[in-house]
Image (cartoon, helix red, strand yellow):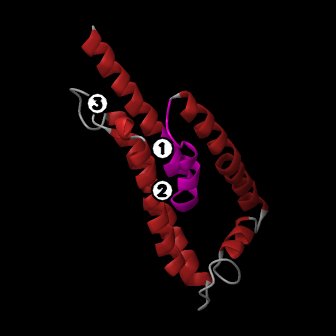
Amino acid sequence: MVSLIVHAVLGLAVIASIVASNPRVYARPANRAWFSPLECVYYGVGIASIGLGWYFNIRFVQEYSHGSANPLWGPGSWTDFIRLMYTNPAAGSASQDYTIANVILLPLFSITDGYRRGLRRPWLYFVSSLFTSFAFAFAFYFATIERQHRHRKAREQAGA
């Protein structure tokens, strides 16, 4: 269970680093609500994915660790978790899809697109996926894009 607590703390630290690295993006848009309905949907989906993931991760650790406290190898560890992701063809199919999307596509997209949008440290969205969830990292990134869009609209309306 200690490894899950460490994951939670690291996840919160990475999220805080993203927000701290981009204070203008995460500031309240001028004359607008703190969050748009679309941002709320993205954050809601992301937070729900964390809740579901934690439910299954806690069950995994409780059912498979058998007293082992080693988070890297042995029963209930990361290596055991990854091995179990491929226990049958259906699980392997879903797992390879998730792995490719999380380890290759998420960083390629968020880093490339993030730098184009002027975000500082966009690679942290990928790092956050390692401690939160793939779905949360994407939802957080999409909410960031929506927030930037709202800032741009506020500037355009102020200048008009």
Percent from the top left, x then y, of residue 96? 74, 54
Going from N to C along the chain, the mark reached first, 1 or 3, is 3
Left or right of 85? Residue 113 is left
Q: Is residue 140 magenta?
A: yes
Going from N to C along the chain, the mark reached first, 3 or 2, is 2
Question: Taken as a whole, is the magenta stretch helix, strand or loop?
Answer: helix
Total of numbered circles in the picture?
3
Residue 111 position by quadrant: top right
Percent from the top left, x then y, of residue 25? 38, 35
Look at mark 3 in the image and give the residue it sits on: 29
Identify the residue at the far bottom of this view. 67
Look at label 2 and name its amino acid: Val
Look at mark 1 in the image and give the residue it sits on: 139
Query: Marks 1 and 2: which is nearer the front?
Result: 2
Q: Secondary structure at mark 1?
A: helix
Real-space Cα separation, disc 1 to disc 2, in angstroms: 15 Å
Cβ atoms under marks 1 and 3 closer than 8 Å: no
Q: Is residue 64 magenta?
A: no
- Crowd class of label 2 (few under 14; some 14 to 19; many from 20; radius 10 Å): many
Query: Marks 1 and 3: which is nearer the front?
Result: 3
Residue 82 position by quadrant: bottom right
Q: Is residue 45 above or below residue 39?
A: below
